[in-house]
Image (tube, grey):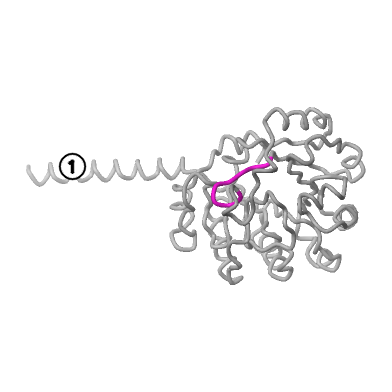
Amino acid sequence: MFVFNTLVLVAIGFACYWFWYHLKTAYRKKPISVNYHFTRKCNYECGFCFHTAKTSYVLPIDEAKRGIKLLVEAGMRKINFAGGEPFLYPAFLGELVRYCKADLKMESVSIVTNGSLVKEKWLETYAKHLDIMAVSCDSFDESTNKLIGRGKGTHLQTFVNLSQLCWKHNVKFKVNTVVCRYDFNEDMNAGIEMVAPFRWKCFQVLVVPGENDSSATLRNAQRFVISDAEYQSFCDRHKHQESFVPESNAVMKSSYLILDEYMRFLNKGVKKPTQSILEVGVPAAMDDVYWDDESFARRGG
């Protein structure tokens, strides 16, 4: 009888563990869309940048591919390559773009770039594997771009030319704008209508502790900060644009999964980064990341 009761208790314990494990697995957050900032280096000096060149490290490409495959196996469907400036490493970037679309059959592959280093030859080779190119433009006044640190005076012409190249090579053209102290009063409607992006994301300038919050960091974004009301005034001026997508500080802080150059998820100043997915796997890293998947869903992924 004692043996029978012991076996029953063991069976009940095993069943409870099995139920708990599968319930946890079923409700574990999946990294549907990931922003992989594989480099921190950049050829621009935007004063509000929150992913600064604290290291020059770039993973070996085989390790980067291994990490991306782990993410796909964990549920990732969309990847966005960012920096720094990803086109400082065009061959590395191109191979990862090809790998994601051709080998892993990912739903969406995109790049965020300042546009200054994109060559048509690169697009001729890799555009067939790329869904979206997002190009940064904070102003249609070149003097404002220079004041921000976005280039030396030729950014707008490069930006316009790249919009045309994207249309030529069947890549969706997207615009990213950081709304800050130097551009929140600007009327950008005519410029946006000229380049006609399929999406125009307008981010409220964000201060991240340890990245751009003081004179002790590589960038100090304090002089760029605007109030919520000033940000809203910019939004009100442009909200009629079909491509317009506003993203306030609250949305930016919580709704993005950002993977750094070591493949650690960043916690945006809330706490230290997670361990690398290459060391602990994606599920363990996801358990330690500050990410609001409901906010992610509300902003459309």
Q: Nearer the viewer, residue 298 or 16?
A: 298
Q: Nearer the viewer, residue 283 or 58?
A: 58
Can residue 288 be seen here? The reply is yes
Residue 203 image-quadrant placement: top right
Tell me where the magenta segment starts and ends, as one range. 205-212
Secondary element at tag 1: helix
* Residue 155 is covered by the magenta coloring: no
What kind of residue is marked 1?
Answer: Leu
Residue at x 18%, y 42% (from the top left corner) = 8
* Position of the C terminus by quadrant: top right
Residue at the farthest left position:
1
Q: Nearer the viewer, residue 235 or 197?
A: 235
Q: Is residue 102 above or below residue 187?
A: below
In percent of width and height, residue 158 lies at 87, 57
Residue at x 85%, y 55% (from the top left corner) = 155
Residue at x 45%, y 48% (from the top left corner) = 288
Residue at x 68%, y 43% (from the top left corner) = 223
Q: Is residue 135 above or below residue 28?
A: below
* Residue 208 is covered by the magenta coloring: yes
* Structural crowding at the residue carrying mark 1, measured as other residues with C-alpha within 10 Å and reported as few (<14), some (14–19) or many (≥20): few
For disc 1, the marked residue is: 9
